[in-house]
Image: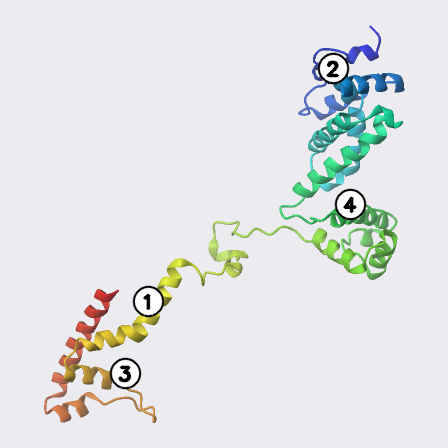
Amino acid sequence: MPATAAIAVRDPWALVPSLGNLDAYINAVNRLPLLTAEEESTAARRLRDHGDLEAAGRLVLSHLRLVVSISRQYVGYGLPQGDLIQEGNVGLMKAVKRFDPDQGVRLVSYAMHWIKAEIHEYILKNWRMVKVATTKAQRKLFFNLRSMKHQLKSGQDDASTHRNTLTEGEVAHVARELNVKREDVLEMETRMSGGDVALEPQSDDDGESFAPIAYLADDSQEPTRVIEARLRDDLAGDGIQRALDVLDPRSRRIVEERWLRVNDDASGGMTLHELAAEYGVSAERIRQIEVAAMKKMKKALTETT
C-alpha cells in the first residue's frame, strides 16, 4: 500500500492516539505522510464539491504536525501543550472546511492563520481568570508585547532578566516597533504583570485574611439594611410621635421633659425632683410614671411595626 494511501481509511482518526499521551501523539502525527500539491488539491475539491469526509480527514491528518509545531510557540504561557494542540486542531478543521484549492495557495499557508487564531483565543480565555485583552487591538498587542519582552530579556544580564516590568526606554522601544501609543504599552504591561486576586478569603481562619470582598462589597442597598434604615427613620420621626399620642398629658410631659427636651444651654429637660415639685408628688412617683409611660410607648411602637 502506498504511504499516502495509508491515511485513506474509513476512520482516519484511528491512526492518531489520544492527546492524553502527548509524546505518543506527537510521534504519531510526525509519522503521518504529507500530501503532494496534486493530492491536496484533489482532496480539497472532493470535499468542496461532494462533501467527502474521507478527503477532509486526509487534509486534516496530513497537517496535524503543523499544529504541533505552532503550539510549541505558546508553551510559555503556562497552559498545557495538549490543550493548545487541541485548540489548534479545531482551527485546522475550520481552515480545511473553508479552503479553496483554486486560490493558488497551499493549505499549510492558509491554515496557519486559523490555527493561531484558535490558540490565541484559548490563551486569552484561560491565561487569567480575568481577561487581559478584549478588543482586537489589545489581543494583538498582548501577543506582540509578550514576544518582544522575551526578546529584550534574552540579551540582558541575570538581574535584568528576572525583572518583570519594562524600563522607560524599553517601553518607548516597544511602542515605536509596534507602532502603538506608549500609554497602550504601559496599560497592557500592567495587565500582564498583575495577577488574579480571589474576592473571597482563601483560608478558613477569617481573622487572618482580608479579601477584597470585605471592602468592595456595597451593602447599603441590601434589602434587609434598607428596611432597617427605613424603620429606624420612621421610629425616630413619626414613630415617636405616635407613641407619645397614647400617653395621658402628665405622662407625656414627663417623658418629653426627661428624654426629648433639649434647651439652648444644653442643660436638657427637668429632673425628677423638679417634676415632683411641680406635680406635688415624690420623685419616686415621677420615676414610676416615667417607667410606665415608656412601657406604653414601647408597646405602641411594636404594634405599629
- The residue to which callout 2 is attached is 54
Secondary-structure class at tag 2: helix
Label 2 vs label 1: CA separation? 74 Å
Left or right of 175? Residue 239 is: left
- The residue to which callout 1 is attached is 231
- The residue to which callout 3 is attached is 260
For label 2, the crowd category at 10 Å Cα-Cα, with few meaning under 14, some 14 to 19 and many 20 or more, is some
Image quarter in which the C terminus is found: bottom left
Please report contact status of discs 3 and 2: CB closer than 8 Å, yes or no: no
In terms of image quadrants, where is residue 52? top right
Secondary-structure class at tag 1: helix
Q: Say whether disc 3 or disc 4 marks the residue closer to the N-terminus.
A: 4
- The residue to which callout 4 is attached is 143
Secondary-structure class at tag 4: helix
Q: Say whether disc 4 or disc 1 marks the residue closer to the N-terminus.
A: 4
Left or right of 91? Residue 253 is: left
